[in-house]
Image (cartoon, grey):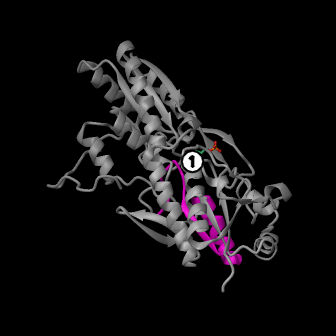
Amino acid sequence: MSRRKRIGILTGGGDSPGLNAVIRAVAKSLMQDAGAEVFGFVDGFAGMIEQQVRRLSYADVSGILTLGGTILGTSNKANPFAYYARGNADVSAEVVRYVREDLKLDAVVAIGGDGTMSIAHRLQQAGIPMVGVPKTIDNDLMYTDRTFGFDTAVAIATEAIDRLHTTAQSHHRVMILETMGRYAGWIALYAGVAGGADIILIPEFDYDIEEVARVCRERARGGQRFTLVCVAEGAKARGGELAVRQVVADSPDPLRLGGVCNVLEHALCQRIDTEVRTAILGHVQRGGTPTAYDRNLATAFGAYAAALVADEQWGRMAAVQQGRLTGVAIADVANRQRTVAPDAPMVATAMAVGTSFGVPGMQLRFDGKVPSAFMT
Ligand code: F6P
């Protein structure tokens, strides 16, 4: 009889609502269906390097479905191939030995974004069988139509727009909401459409401040005495710079963005008569309990990842494509981003109701047919 599988699990990068739902689904499924022993690394890859691991019991993963954050902790700095705490040394050989020989793990399930998948891919090449689960509120991982956490972030951002709406309307102001979304504008796009934003500015389409001002003025002239703007933190003006809040030197992705709404406010105040106010949503959109959709998606991803483990399909990441779960190569996902294309269905939907992307001349071209896809 073959021995029980021993599987590690970790969460890497920024937290995202639904992480605990994935941990629960992976662990319960592996324990129940494959009789596996499951071990959780503390603080992501930091736990692998610093040898901080704990065995997870069934009770440990019960009652966590609705919890935000991650019961295992996470780190967006620890990288075994360049470990900041040891002068950026490559400690991967040590890590492989620890995982395979000391802990005797058969595989590790890594739950994370493109940075985590990049490390997972390299560890797989170095000798640790890996399985991935796609996480990020930004929804920008390749080869999956959705990442868990995105729906919750969109719901929070939409509520924020709804709340700003009342002040915008009552005080006849331009209200700007800044969402997260470093290189991809999915959150701003989906929350903007859901909240009825008049202008949506995203990293994929550099905006023209004159066009943004023109839309605000035109609305006022037409009797709409307020304007709602939803801007992703990574948006920038044509020929302009990213609004960098902080540079975290040790991090694999050192730029922390924030403040583009203040740049916009300053530029708009010089061009329109209407008062302008701003709000930065920040980490509020990553916190708290996941939506029902994200709980379901996270649970489905977790169960699918456990099936990949049971089937020994190493180097694969769970993904959802056109409503079906599938496995894609972690190597193909590593260090890449899925951004919003100009012909994305939700861009067409936004433009169909007159939403501006701050780009002069950007027009909806149906070419005789309305886009039939809804959410991709
Ligand atoms: O990648 C997820 C994300 O929330 C981005 O949208 C954001 O730019 C970044 O993480 C913020 O990172 P931190 O939590 O380190 O400030």
In this rendered view, identify the residue nearer to me: 289 or 340. 289
Ligand 1 is located in which of the four quadrants? top right
Q: Quadrant of residue 197?
A: top left
The residue lying at 49 percent from left, 71 percent from top is 328
Locate residue 334, reporting x and y percent: 57, 65
Question: Is the residue marked 1 within 8 Å of ligand 1, measured from its CB?
Answer: yes
* Outermost residue to the top: 171
The residue lying at 36 percent from left, 61 percent from top is 323
Q: Amino acid under label 1? A: Ser
Quarter of the image that includes the C terminus: bottom left
Q: Residues within 10 Å of mark 1 (few under 14, many from 20)?
A: many
Q: In the displayed structure, would residue 119 be above or below residue 262?
A: below
Locate residue 71, reporting x and y percent: 67, 49
Q: In the displayed structure, would residue 205 be above or below residue 55?
A: above
Residue 143 makes an appearance in the image: no
* Outermost residue to the left: 368
* Outermost residue to the right: 86
Q: In the displayed structure, would residue 228 be above or below residue 343?
A: above
Q: From which residue to which does the magenta span run?
A: 113-142
- Name the element at disc 1: loop
* Magenta run includes residue 249: no
Q: In the displayed structure, would residue 62 be above or below residue 257?
A: below
Residue tagged 1 = 16
Locate residue 367, reporting x and y percent: 17, 55
Q: Is residue 29 left or right of residue 97?
A: left
The residue lying at 76 percent from left, 73 percent from top is 96
Residue 262 makes an appearance in the image: yes
In this rendered view, identify the residue nearer to me: 259 or 284. 284
The residue lying at 82 percent from left, 73 percent from top is 102
Q: Is residue 153 left or right of residue 224?
A: right
Locate residue 223, reporting x and y percent: 24, 18
Quarter of the image that includes the N terminus: bottom right
